Amino acid sequence: MLQAIELSKTYKGSVALNALNLNIDPGEIFCLLGANGAGKTTTINLFLNFVSPSSGAARINGLNVVDHPLETKKFLAYIPEQVMLYRNLTGVENLEYFTCLSGERYSRPQLLDFLAQAGLPAGAAEKRVNSYSKGMRQKVGIAIAIAKRARALLLDEPTSGLDPKASNEFSELLKKLSGTGAAILMATHDLFRAKESGTRVGIMKHGRMVAALRTEDLGHADLERIYLEHMHD
Amino acid sequence: MILEIAKKEARETFRDGRFRILAAVVIALLAVSLGLGWKRYSDVSRQIEAGRKATRQNWLTQGEKNPHSAAHYGVYAFMPRTPLSFVDDGVDPYTGVSVWLEAHKQNDFKYKPAEDSNTLARFGELTGAAVLQLLIPLLIILLSFTTFAGEREQGTLRQLLSLGIKREDLAAGKALGIAASLGMVLVPAALIGAGVLIFLGDPRVLPDTAARLVLLALFYLFYFAAILGTSLAVSAWSKSTRAALLTLLGFWIVNGLIAPRAFTDVARYLHPTPSAFDFAKMVAHDLENGINGDSSTAQRARELQQRLLKQYQVDRIDKLPVSYRGVSLQEGENHGDEVFDKRYSELWDDFERQNAVRRAGGIIAPLLPMRSLSMALAGTDFAQHRDFAVAAENYRRMFIRMINDDITKNAAGKDLYVRGDDLWQTVPEFQYVAPGVAAVLRANLGSIALLLLWTFAAVCAAWWSARRIEVL
């Protein structure tokens, strides 16, 4: 579903991503680990076609994102570190706006149901989002992804700054989404979360993927050890 | 989808307390300025009507006197105000709307550099036109500078574009949303203005007024579209909202304050006009020394006498079958008319040239063509004042000639020649018909072209920049 082929990005001579090869199938949750600047966000931006690759290709559902910038986004949902919403609108109005722009139309009860599925507390949906916590904003982001029936999710450190309970809820939602056949690519610093919810993890360093592992073969301690070994210069 | 974006933009704007306050202030200013404008228009119209009746009455009832005294007594001519002058009083404050018509002199319509306005002086006046030309663009800028730069800064732009929407659609939706918010301010004002004109305006000129109003509204819409397009383009290009706002405020200042002033100065430099004092001196000099500067008044009088003696085959002036006084008065008028035609058309052509330079300034400031069109459709621009001045002067020449002809025919050999009401009544009342809307449009094709060019260029710039907007 999500495919990177020799995907590379160079910014003014410095290599941000170096020949990444990656294939994420429906139902998989692939967690990208690595220090800041390792190329995780660049990978996501390349899939979103927000930056164009220096060489190689990013494909979604077999379509090159550079040649099909609008079609590939039909399959896609993107949840950044901070889901940004329009502060003068309520949660449900925000959801309505974003789903409407992705070409879907839902009735109000359906929209409220998506927010409930995403775990937004009842009653919050009708409040303006300037009163929302970060966890609540991320849930609206998930609701957008659910409503869009996205088949591929790109998540950029979506749980950083969430308390453990909110973070756990978020992981459960991800598992539910991948259970419905979504391919998920998530950049994260949270080794524990990556082991818990990911099906595979990839460790990145200086723009290269230095290791890709199946989480079912690993214990928590193993993952941390391997990660630190790779981070060691 | 574009409509959905527009709806959301408008909804967000209405919920913003700052917008509500700003809109209330602009509506209040617009209402006050239009109200004051209407009062000014109706006061001036009433005074003009009263003055018109009084001057005619005075002329008809001036009693028995020598006709040449009556010609000196003279009449006043009043320039009828178009109802739309309540929106834009144009050059009225600097030119006045009346002129005294009398023997020997083309009185001044006060188009003098000393009284020529500068824009800073005009800025102090609260007219509907000033609100529409300066404050509404400011409101547009404040509504739109965050359009793209703000979404990028907030991070919502990434999310929007990750949904797979076209950047052009986003731009169109946002433009529409801002237009809807503006409509909340402008539509009520336009409806009230139209209502006032229809129910309180002069019904005799209603069709012309309606056509002028529709065109005026249309041109203002083009002007606002030009400002909005420019704002969206700048917002798409700017790295931050701060940069967008500073750039747009700079544009607003150049458009509204610097360019009008600068081009007025450039126009004066390129096409200097004499001071009122120098102009009066030049006219007096020409009257004294002949239009070519080679004949004195006394010399011209001797030549006229020679010609008349020869024409009527007599040897002395007092033997002429016509009144020498009447002939020489008209001869003086004819000479004066030549001088006035030459000097005034030189002066007025220079003013027209100055206006052309100012209009050319429209290349950098859309306000300039907009201001020309606004004044033209309100019937208060220089060209329409000149048209009136020419009509009044022609009337003056006509009625002075009637009086002089009467003297020539009937006063020969009489030491004391007196006439009464019967002669005064043969002089028709001055009637002025202002140029119709078609003629006004023809005279302002340059401004129309510049304004449309601005609108077109700004919309293209907004579209082009929106397509290329950077996400990160």
Image (tube, rainbow, N blue to C red):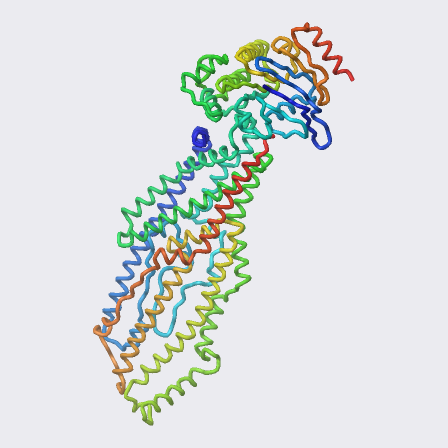
The picture quadrant where one finds residue A123 is top left
Hey, which residue is sitting farthest bottom in the picture?
B315
- Assign the C terminus of chain A to one quadrant of the image: top right
Give how far across and how far down residue A4 sits, in percent. 64, 22
Hey, which residue is sitting farthest right in the picture?
A233
Question: Residue at point 34% right, 72% down?
Answer: B397
Tally the marks: 0
Give how far across and how far down residue B357 sits, in percent. 51, 58
Q: Nearer the viewer, residue B7 or A177?
A: A177
Question: Residue at point 37% right, 77% down?
Answer: B334
As drawn, is B441 to the left or to the right of A18? left
The picture quadrant where one finds residue B300 is bottom left
Camera sees residue B280:
yes
- Assign the N terminus of chain A to one quadrant of the image: top right
Q: Is residue A122 above or below residue B212?
A: above
Give how far across and how far down residue B356 sits, in percent. 49, 59
Q: Nearer the viewer, residue A187 or B229?
A: A187
Camera sees residue B16:
no
Give how far across and how far down residue B318 sits, in percent. 31, 90
Question: Residue at point 52% right, 64% down?
Answer: B272
Q: Is residue B254 above or below residue A183?
A: below
Q: Is residue B314 above or below residue B96?
A: below
Q: Nearer the viewer, residue B447 or A131?
A: B447
Hey, which residue is sitting farthest front in the picture?
A62
As drawn, is A4 to the left or to the right of B132? right
Q: Nearer the viewer, residue B81 or B296?
A: B81
